[in-house]
Amino acid sequence: MGIGEFNSQDLLHNIKHETLIITGTQDRLVRYSHSVRLYELIPNSIIRFLPKVGHLFYVPDPHPTAKLVNDFLAFPPSSSNDPPRSRL
């Protein structure tokens, strides 16, 4: 089986940690619908879109990416008593 035939969608629900998904709105390698599908299948995921950049969204200006990651890491993981973090 080649890597092109590999599909992990059935395993994504097993990810228990909060997950940050970042994608550029002009990404031509990973379709918008695929990024949204990851978000839908990973229970504790958060998705953020960076406008006007492609697959290497961090190359033209790393600051927006760094801010997203820093903001994500600044909050401790939610406990069952905490209100859920905004996913969008």
Image (cartoon, rainbow, N blue to C red):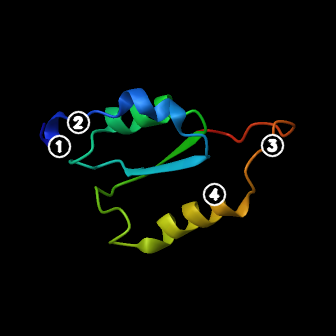
Q: What's the residue type where badge 2 is placed?
A: Phe
Kindly identify the residue that appears in the image at 53 percent across and 34 percent down. 14
Kindly identify the residue that appears in the image at 34 percent across and 34 percent down. 8
Q: Mark 1: which secondary structure?
A: helix
Mark 2 and mark 3 residues within 8 Å of each other at the beta carbon = no
Q: Which mark is residue 79?
A: 3
Real-space CA distance between mark 3 and mark 4, rounded to the nearest whole angstrom: 15 Å
Mark 3 and mark 4 residues within 8 Å of each other at the beta carbon = no
Real-space CA distance between mark 2 and mark 1, rounded to the nearest whole angstrom: 5 Å
Task: Judge by depth and name the residue closer to the eye, 73 or 59.
Answer: 73
Residue at numbered disc 1: 3
Residue at numbered disc 2: 6
Q: What's the residue type where badge 3 is placed?
A: Ser
Residue at numbered disc 4: 72
On screen, residue 28 versus residue 85, left or right, reads: left
Mark 2 and mark 1 residues within 8 Å of each other at the beta carbon = yes
Q: Which mark is residue 35?
A: none
First in sequence: mark 3 vs mark 4: 4
First in sequence: mark 2 vs mark 4: 2
2 vs 3, front mark: 2
Residue 83: image location, x then y, percent: 81, 37
Kindly identify the residue that appears in the image at 74 percent across and 57 percent down. 75
Q: Mark 2: which secondary structure?
A: loop
* Quarter holding residue 15: top right
